[in-house]
Image (cartoon, rainbow, N blue to C red):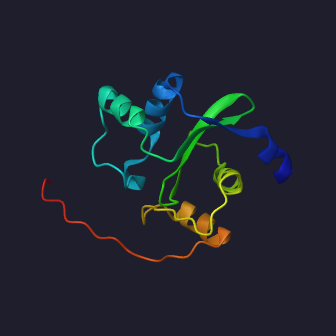
Amino acid sequence: MEKLREMQIKLKAVKSIDLEFLYELLKQRESKHNISHRRMPNYNQHVKFVNSKPYAFWYIIIENEERVGSVYLTTLNEIGVSLVKGKGLEEEVLKLIIKRHPRKRFFINISPKNKKLELLIKKFGFKMIQKTYEIDREN
């Protein structure tokens, strides 16, 4: 059954037609899981970010012809996955991105509060290699 679901998932390169979907996806993300930004960017800031092509590869995740998330791979081999709430496709998406872009090493940065994702990536064989701390003088 897992193989069948994996086959129903496709990755297509992010295009300008995906800007609104990506923004809605960003708005759905739980703030406790955010590690990339403190405040929600406005739509114009979001468009500028997407158009800057910040990742080596950035895809929209399609399941049964419906957009259900995005996944990217940076030039430093960092993987980022964002899904519509309730989709639960992280495992299948990780398999696809790793298969599509074989590398010796991959990295995933996660919030320490995202225990579900932490369990999944450990199951995949990822190991913790660092802890990062921050001081935020704006707040």
In the figure, residue 67 lies in which quadrant? top right
The residue sitting at 58% across, 39% down in the picture is 59
**Quadrant where the image shows the C terminus:** bottom left
Image x and y of residue 106, in percent: 57, 65
The residue sitting at 46% across, 61% down in the picture is 110
**Count of picture labels:** 0
Closer-to-camera residue (57/39):
57
* Position of residue 125 in the picture relative to residue 112 (left or right): right
* Position of residue 138 in the picture relative to residue 13 (left or right): left
The residue sitting at 78% across, 47% down in the picture is 6
Closer-to-camera residue (73/82):
73
The residue sitting at 49% across, 24% down in the picture is 16
* Position of residue 101 in the picture relative to residue 2 (left or right): left
Q: Is 52 above or below relative to 16?
A: below
Image x and y of residue 133, in percent: 29, 70
Q: Residue furthest top?
A: 17
In the figure, residue 47 lies in which quadrant? top left
Image x and y of residue 97, in percent: 65, 52
Image x and y of residue 48, in percent: 34, 31
Q: Is 97 above or below relative to 85?
A: below
* Position of residue 53 in the picture relative to residue 6 (left or right): left
